[in-house]
Image (cartoon, rainbow, N blue to C red):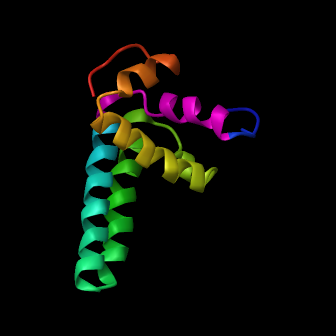
Amino acid sequence: MAQKIATYAEFWPYYLREHSDPNCRRLHYLGTTLALLCLIAAIGTAAPGFILAALIFGYGPAWIAHFFIEKNRPATFTYPFWSLFSDFRMYFIWLGGKLPRELEKAGIRRQAV
């Protein structure tokens, strides 16, 4: 990525291309699921430690996926808010079964997950 992305509309396809490997996305889904469960536990128990756990379980698998599977730098470091929003967007689009269409629009050939 040579120049800074100016709009979220430009960022979303970039984000998907940075997650082109299905195994990378699998680790993201795992991390997002664990983070959401930790946040629910934090609300249900009023134990703030679950918030720290949500960050660790959310970002840990995602960063491992980028460093060892995609071999790229997580977008979180450059675009933290767009990246976080996109992680949840990708997760819920995947749950809804519509991710293949989004991947195709971003130029990623059809793959599982």
Residue at 50%, 28% (x, y): give it: 17
> Where on the picture, by quarter, is residue 1?
top right
> Is the residue 75 above or below the residue 24 in the image?
below
Number of numbered labels in the structure image: 0
> Is the residue 59 above or below the residue 50 in the image?
above
> Where on the picture, by quarter, is residue 39?
bottom left
Task: Return the residue nearer the eye: 43 or 60.
Answer: 43
> Is the residue 107 above or below the residue 99 in the image?
above
Q: Examine the rendering and report whether any part of residue 24 can be seen.
A: no
**Residue 17 painted magenta:** yes
**Residue 15 painted magenta:** yes
Q: Residue furthest front?
A: 96
Q: Examine the rendering and report whether any part of residue 44 can be seen.
A: yes
> Is the residue 48 above or below the residue 7 in the image?
below
Task: Return the residue nearer the eye: 68 or 19.
Answer: 19
The percent position of residue 109, horizontal first and vertical second, equals 41, 13
Residue at 73%, 32% (x, y): give it: 2
- For residue 3, side relative to residue 90 (left or right): right
Query: Bounds of the magenta span?
Result: 8-23
Residue at 51%, 50% (x, y): give it: 85
The percent position of residue 101, horizontal first and vertical second, equals 41, 20
Residue at 31%, 61% (x, y): give it: 35
The percent position of residue 104, horizontal first and vertical second, equals 45, 17
Q: Quadrant of the C terminus?
A: top left
The percent position of residue 28, horizontal first and vertical second, equals 34, 45
- For residue 89, side relative to residue 36 (left or right): right
Magenta region, main secondary structure: helix
